[in-house]
Amino acid sequence: MQKAKRKQRARQRKPAKASKIILIITVCAAAIAGGFFGFYKFESGIVYKEVYLEAGSDMPDVSEFLKRDAKDASFSKDSTFDTQVPGDYKLTIKYKAPLFGSLSLPVTLHVTDTTAPVVEALPEYLFFTYQEGKPEAKDLLASVTDATKWTAAFSGSYDFSSVGEFNAEVTVTDAAGNNATVSVPCKVINDTTAPTISGVEPLAVSQGDTISYTANVTVTDDYDKNPTLEVDTSAVNPDKRGIYNITYIATDASGNKSEASTTIQIKSMVIAAATESTVNKMADDILSEIITPGMSQLDEARAVFDWVVANITYSETAGIDDLLSAAYKGMYNRVGDCTVKQKTAEVMLNRLGIKNMEIEKIRDTRGHYWLLIDVGEGWYHYDPNAQLDGSLIFYWHDEDLWNYSNTHGNTHNYDKSKYPTIQ
């Protein structure tokens, strides 16, 4: 009987022991689960849920979204934002946590704009009566600095159609509604003053040279910083020797115009071989053949005159302007126009010490050059060219030359104001 009771008590103790074990296991599991949950909460709580940034700031690094350092944290590929544009950006930070692996943690970036635009106004705004309508408000501003897009508007109504001065207020407002207002001095002007052209002088170039018509020419205006300059060269033939008229035309923004005129001389090319020493030797060699001892200066001048007339064949297309080149051509090639003949004689007369100077015909359809000489009796005309009628103008009085010119198509009309008194 007692033995049966003991067995019954033993069977009753076994379930109690099992319950304890189950309880222990349950507690341990709960503790482990709680630990894991707490660790997960710790790891997943590494990010700030919301981050605020002022528009215009530099692009933030992922570390600015973390509560503690984490080398493996990064933005997900689909996380995009623009610090220049205010707004709420939903981002995801990828984080490789111990035990749990890769976590995707949501955060919100708030890009806010609380700063008003920085506005710099023009020191003065000028508006001209020729301009149509009225300016836009932004035209009165030198610069605007803001992180977002902005607009400018006049704070009131202003009359830009009548001459006068006034202050205009311009308000600049950014995308977030922040604004700043500046006052701009305005002047409405009726500009009637033409630009000023400076540096216009006669030009001279050789055939084939590049012509710079505006190298020393400047244009200034009282209001227009960049007035236009045109050069009318329609009368210039750069391939033909001669003196041509050119006109400079300056125009400002108001349409005011000014003009300045000058001339350009197209000269023949310079002969490289025509050095001073070479040309002088050529002249001396000829003079040694035509000048004899005891000659007066007038006789010497006649000898030079006769040599040039007899030995240099006239050619309208063989002209040359440079003194040494022309004389070289006359003495070496023995061909040339009136300029070649005149300058060949000039070099020889210079070697003889005979005073001379060039004289030019008043240009009409064609030009002509000859010399004046003075052998101690005053200035006389000296043209070492046989005229079309065979006349030889050697040592002529001024009256005789004018009579001849007036009866032969103004061949030698000249401007008396440019030369000394001629006998």
Image (cartoon, helix red, strand yellow):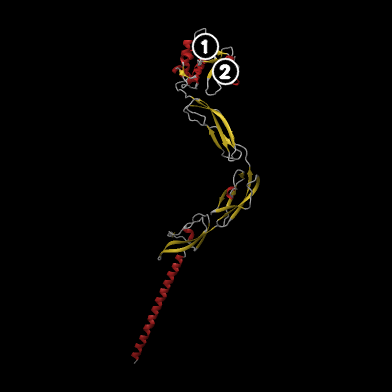
Quadrant in the rendering for residue 131: top right
- For the view shown, which residue lies furthest in the bottom direction? 1
Q: Position of residue 35 (x, y in %)?
A: 43, 70
Q: Position of residue 140 (x, y in %)?
A: 59, 48
Q: Are marks 2 and 1 in contact (CB under 8 Å)?
A: no
Residue beneath disc 2: 406
Q: Position of residue 390 (x, y in %)?
A: 50, 14
Cα gap from disc 2 to disc 1, whole angstroms: 25 Å
Quadrant in the rendering for residue 196: top right
Foreground of the two, 190 or 354:
190
Q: Earlier in the sequence, mark 2 or mark 1?
A: 1
- What residue sits 45% from the left and 67% below the top? 41
The relative height of residue 296 versus residue 268 in the rendered view (above or below) is above
For label 1, the SS is helix
Q: Residues within 10 Å of mark 2 (few under 14, many from 20)?
A: few
The relative height of residue 339 versus residue 168 in the rendered view (above or below) is above
Quadrant of the frame with the C terminus: top right
Dot label at residue 292: none
Q: Amino acid at mark 1?
A: Arg
Dot label at residue 302: 1
The relative height of residue 126 versus residue 364 in the rendered view (above or below) is below
Q: Position of residue 48 (x, y in %)?
A: 49, 63
The relative height of residue 171 versus residue 218 in the rendered view (above or below) is below
- What residue sits 40% from the left and 74% below the top? 29
